Image: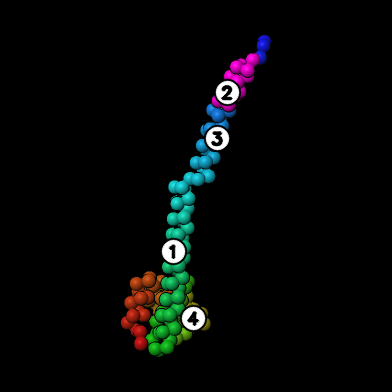
């Protein structure tokens, strides 16, 4: 087999064509994933949403503290938090704590002898209060607006 300049050129061209056919899909795949604008935008939107939610949650937490501080300054007694069940323990802004057992028979049974909770602050009915810890942004804003100096 005799090699001529024409046959070498043809072989080089064929090699380049085959290399291009093999390499182009890989390069296109790499470029698509490297520069995928839609995925980058989606990630940025997700990060922004999480950041906004964290900022909103932080603002609500600050507003709850403001409500409690304002209530204490003005001498207004409001429920701050509720925890537990049977009894539900309600803590008020003036430091008082009340116990709600849900019904009279449970109150009588759980108070026992000696009583486990202060009988003067223990009640047989359901807890009628919604504490500041469960207020939403609108409730907090309304309360602060109503009680602003």
Q: Residue furthest front?
A: 5
Stretch of the chain drawn in magenta: 4-18
Residue 126: where, in percent of width, then height?
38, 74
Sequence-first disc among 4 and 1: 1
How far apart in space, not on screen, are marks 3 and 2 (Cα)? 20 Å
Q: Which residue corresponds to mark 4?
A: 117
Residue 52, numbered circle:
1
Which numbered mark, 4 or 2, is in the foreground of this view? 2
Question: Of 33 and 79, which appears nearest the observer?
Answer: 33
Q: Which residue is at 45% across, 59% downward?
A: 48
- What whole-number distance in Å separates the C-alpha atoms at marks 4 and 2? 93 Å
Using the image, determine if residue 21 lies above or below residue 128. Answer: above
Image height check: is 146 above or below 36? below
Q: Is residue 26 magenta?
A: no
Circle 4 or circle 1, nearest the eye: 1
Residue located at (67% from left, 11% from top): 2
Dominant secondary structure (helix, strand or loop) of the stretch shown in magenta: helix
Would residue 16 be counted in the magenta stretch? yes
Q: Earlier in the sequence, mark 4 or mark 2?
A: 2
Alpha carbon distance from label 3 to label 1: 38 Å
> Which mark, residue 26?
3
Q: Are marks 4 and 3 in contact (CB under 8 Å)?
A: no
C-alpha gap between disc 4 and disc 1: 43 Å
Quadrant (top left/top right/bottom left/bottom right) for the C terminus: bottom left
**Quadrant in the rendering for residue 146:** bottom left
Which residue bears the numbered disc 2? 13
């Amino acid at each position: 087999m005799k090699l001529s300049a024409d046959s070498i050129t043809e072989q080089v061209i064929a090699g380049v064509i085959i290399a291009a056919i093999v390499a182009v899909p890989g390069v296109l795949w790499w470029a698509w994933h490297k520069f995928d604008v839609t995925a980058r935008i989606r990630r940025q939107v997700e990060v922004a949403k999480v950041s906004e939610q964290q900022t909103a949650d932080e603002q609500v937490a600050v507003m709850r503290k403001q409500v409690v501080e304002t209530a204490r300054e003005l001498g207004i007694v409001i429920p701050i938090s509720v925890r537990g069940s049977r009894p539900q323990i309600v803590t008020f802004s003036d430091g008082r704590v009340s116990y709600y057992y849900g019904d009279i028979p449970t109150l009588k049974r759980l108070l026992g002898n000696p009583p486990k909770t202060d009988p003067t602050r223990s009640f047989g009915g359901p807890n009628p209060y919604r504490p500041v810890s469960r207020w939403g942004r609108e409730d907090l804003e309304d309360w602060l607006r109503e009680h602003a100096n």
